[in-house]
Image: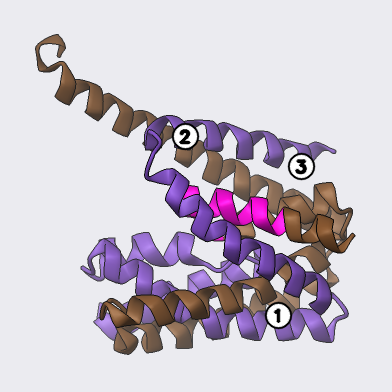
Amino acid sequence: MVITIILIGLMAGILSGMMGVGGGLILIPAMVLLLGIGQHAAQGISLLVIVPTALAGVWRLNKEKLVDFKIAFQLAIGAVIGALISANLIQSLSSATLKTVFGLFIIAVGIRTVLTARQSKLKVRAREHPDQD
Amino acid sequence: MLTKTKLLTIGFIAGLLSGLLGVGGGIILVPAMTEYAGITQHTAHATSLAVIIPTALVSSVIYGMNGNLEPLTAIYLAIGSSVGAIVGAKIMKRLSPSQLKYSFGILIIIVGLRMVFA
């Protein structure tokens, strides 16, 4: 079981590293569909996994002076308040409802990803064959 | 709108999403920072990570207080995913990004449909 979980983490990490998306988007469905973890617990676990991952990222990117802590502070005040509200509210939702909400969210992200990928593909083609436009 | 109010509002929406869905909220933070606060893509990405740390921490505590947390599973997943993220970023440099993103988009639409209907 431990090996399976580490391997799922590895696969999720590879995908999110390749796609430039946060780990939660991939980790949560993997936990729910492959490990049979409940939707609420999967989301809680995802949040806990995100903390050290983001810490490592800030550590690395701060060396390149890319982190604007002043702006981060303002955003974080709003974000923590928002998270306090929604994280409390969803605890009383049924697992099926929360799963549906999450499913709809990743469908939306998927559609957006497909559309932007298609757009950049067209742009590349236009650059390579300017006469065809 | 004042920049301060703008940032608080962007943060608030990202926080709501993070607590609701168990994600970091970067998906809102990064585009909102570049579009509405005039921040460059690289800085926005790095800054969003700094916002995500306290946000995810607060949310995970609330999930934990409601018995919706398995710290051991989280540790194992974190070990795997931190190694995976490095590998993934290296692979990405050798492949065509738009074709890959297209396939990834289709994949998560299918996964999303399964979560909604199964």
Q: Is residue A67 visible?
A: yes
Q: Chain of mark 3?
A: B
> Label 2 amino acid?
Leu
Expressed as whole percent of the image width and height from the top left, the position of residue A89 reads 74, 75
Q: Is residue B9 visible?
A: no
Expressed as whole percent of the image width and height from the top left, the position of residue A123 reads 23, 29
Q: Quadrant of residue A49?
A: bottom right
Q: Residues within 10 Å of mark 1 (few under 14, many from 20)?
A: many
Q: Are marks 3 and 1 on the same chain?
A: yes
Which of the marked residues, 3 or 1, is nearer the chain's N terminus? 1
Q: Chain of mark 2?
A: B
Q: Quadrant of residue B19?
A: bottom right
What are the residue bounds of the magenta stretch? A8-22
Spatial CA span between label 2 and label 3: 24 Å
- Identify the residue position indicated by label 2 in the image: B100
Q: Which chain is brown?
A: A
Q: Is residue B116 magenta?
A: no
Front: mark 2 or 1: 2
> Label 3 amino acid?
Val
- Identify the residue position indicated by label 1 in the image: B60
Q: Are marks 2 and 1 on the same chain?
A: yes
Q: Quadrant of the C terminus of chain A?
A: top left
Image-based side of A25 in relation to B116, left or right: left
Secondary element at tag 1: helix
Spatial CA span between label 3 and label 1: 24 Å
Secondary element at tag 3: helix
- Identify the residue position indicated by label 3 in the image: B116
Question: Magenta stretch: dominant SS?
Answer: helix
Q: Is residue A50 above or below residue B4?
A: above
Secondary element at tag 2: helix
Q: Which chain is purple?
A: B
Expressed as whole percent of the image width and height from the top left, the position of residue B112 reads 69, 41
